[in-house]
Image (cartoon, rainbow, N blue to C red):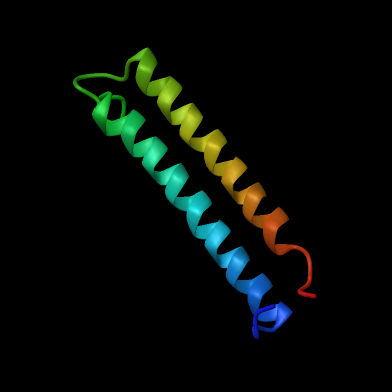
Amino acid sequence: MSGMEPEARDFLIRVSLSILAGLTWLFTNVTAGIFLGWLFFDTHPTKGNYIFYSWLLLSFAGLILIYLRLWKNRFH
């Protein structure tokens, strides 16, 4: 057993999971948006731009739901 209190351990786990989820969301969208060219418009929006921005909004809502679910419970 470690000498860490359960509340501190639970808090650090939640912070770590929050950072991991946020970075995963960020890297996924950077990859899809910049590397595949769907983030920027040339002269007008294309179907890929619409799909990318729809995905961006839906996945951001999912990220917020993950954060709410992760932080809603009290510490031990």
| Image x and y of residue 40, in percent | 25, 30
Answer with the quarter of the image where residue 1 lies.
Answer: bottom right
Residue at (62% x, 64% y) in the render:
14
Answer with the quarter of the image where residue 2 lies.
Answer: bottom right
Residue at (63% x, 55% y) in the render:
67
| Image x and y of residue 6, in percent | 72, 78
Q: Is residue 45 above or below residue 26?
A: above
Answer with the quarter of the image where residue 58 lies.
Answer: top right
Q: Is residue 36 above or below residue 31?
A: above
In the image, taking residue 50 as reference, residue 16 lies left or right, namely: right
| Image x and y of residue 11, in percent | 64, 73
Asked whether 12 or 63 is in front, the reply is 12
The C terminus sits in image quarter: bottom right
| Image x and y of residue 30, in percent | 33, 38
Q: Is residue 41 above or below residue 19?
A: above
Residue at (32% x, 33% y) in the render:
31
Q: Which residue lies most toward the front here?
A: 1
In the image, taking residue 61 as reference, residue 19 lies left or right, namely: left
Q: Is residue 39 above or below residue 65?
A: above
Q: Count how many numbered circles sit on residues in the image.
A: 0
Q: Which residue lies most toward the top here?
A: 47
Q: Which residue lies most toward the left here?
A: 42
In the image, taking residue 25 as reference, residue 58 lies left or right, namely: right
Residue at (71% x, 79% y) in the render:
7
